[in-house]
Image (cartoon, grey):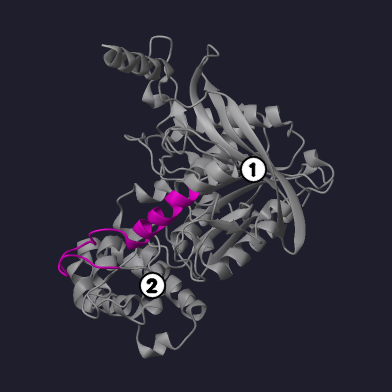
Amino acid sequence: MKHYLSCFLVLSSVLCLAQKRAIPVDTMVVTTHTTTIKNKSINYKATTGTQPVWNEKGEPIAALYYTFYERTNTNNTNERPLIISFNGGPGSASVWMHIAYTGPKVLNLDSEGYPIQPYGVSDNPNSILDIADIVYVNPVNTGYSRMIPDSKGELPKRDIFFGINADIKYLAEWINTFVSRKGRWESPKYIIGESYGGTRVMGLANELQNRQWMYLNGVILVSPADYKLYNTNQPVYSALNLPYFTAAAWYHNMLSPELQQKDLLDILPEAEDFAINNLMPALAKGGFISENEKGQISKKMAYYSGLSETSILQNNLDVPTQFYWKDLLRYKTGQTIGRLDSRYLGIDKRETGISPDYSPELMSWNHAFTPAINYYLREHLNFKTDIKYQMFGDVHPWDRRNDHTREGLRQAMAQNPFLKVLIQSGYYDGATTYFGAKYTMWQIDPSGKMKDRFTFKGYRSGHMMYLRSEDLITANDDLRAFIKDALTNGKAAKYPKK
């Protein structure tokens, strides 16, 4: 009897101590660190935790997880540039740029950007923390960010968060609170977004300026996904993929000797010119193109893509990217190439088919980034929770209607003479191609009156160009140059007389 009573008391104690698994609504953990960046000793403070999203009644409806790095061995903190960083998806945590690009720690990788074991992080001697403070923001249902139930235990409506315009609206409000809490209204401000984050920050530029009265110095688009382009379903836009095909084929030695012996940057302008001036008009003709012209175009496409003329003609000149990933090496090695980074190779069950079974680069990244970020946040930054870190969260269905983000960025630039834009893309990115990013840049301001405020930089890697060590150095240096160039240095916010 005593034995059963003891078991009952122990079980009762465990049940009393057990708590519902939930993230704190408003909390933070602060740690201090030292690193070396560009051969200079940098002391910094890392603040990681959650900050609420409120509804119109002032009630918390979500807790957003963030990590904020501030350099401490410097003067005039309020005048230091502030970088607000997002990844994409939609539904991706702010993990990729955090521990592989701009932050003070980077994932363990080889020189070409392939993950290695043991998993973990090391110091990033190229981080931009030497010149700017950085906050990495995880939108709702990514990272440790979660919706908060009300007093009845009911979660808020999903359409408050999960859509192009909803996402922009609540994140702009959150940024306003963050800047106020940290006392950084005087700081020059920049927003950076990767992939879908490009759509997000284009929209945020206008929302912050016209709803939060927060003016930016710079917007940075890393491998941007422009859904004004992707959602058209117009064959003519597939012409924008051809220069990427050229890059991927060159990397895998699938071009003719005449092209293969040249440097990549020497042949891409040729492919770009053909794509815009020949392929796009040909695709516009659809099924009414003459057989002679169709044959000439297919022959030149084969020359620049590494595909056979037969494959191109079977696709009516409109070659889907997923077919390209499957077909480029089909008759050479039988392997597939990666979507986000076409340097990666995959193995499918069958060599037949029109698309790969999986994305080899994403599988490689997931199995390396996931343990690294969980280890880093717990053991280095001391943020410990039983909540799962969501690399990719439940954010679908995502409302893509009324996408005016491209126009929003144009308006923000027109209204703010200080605002400049940097676009960074990898040549081997087959998801958000570098030439598609150039096209977006060209279309933001049709007048051409602000084109001197745009900068494009390309790199010899994929979607996350910073994974390759040479590009990690170059891309961060390009960020430094852009941040400094977008500082006003006492100039007045006005357009000069002509």
- 174 vs 420: above or below: above
The three-letter code of the residue at mark 2 reads: Ala
Q: How many marks?
A: 2
**Residue 95 seen anywhere in this rendered image of the structure:** no
To which quarter of the image does residue 348 belong? bottom left
User: Which range is magenta?
Assistant: 346-373
- 440 vs 189: above or below: below
Residue in the foreground of this view, choosing between 301 and 247: 247
Q: Report whether 336 appears left or right of 424.
A: left
Residue in the foreground of this view, choosing between 493 and 79: 79
In percent of the image, x 38 and y 26: which residue is there? 159
Residue in the foreground of this view, choosing between 487 and 405: 487
Q: Secondary structure at mark 2?
A: helix
Q: Position of residue 227 (x, y in %)?
A: 40, 46
Q: Report whether 366 appears left or right of 60.
A: left
Question: Upstream in the sequence, badge 2 or badge 1?
Answer: 2
Tell which tag, 2 or 1, sits nearer the viewer: 2
Q: Position of residue 1 (x, y in %)?
A: 25, 11
Q: Report whether 10 appears left or right of 439.
A: left
In percent of the image, x 32 and y 79: which residue is there? 300
Label 1 Cα crowd, 10 Å radius (few <14 / some 14-19 / many 20+): some
**Residue 74 seen anywhere in this rendered image of the structure:** yes
Q: Which mark is residue 414?
A: 1
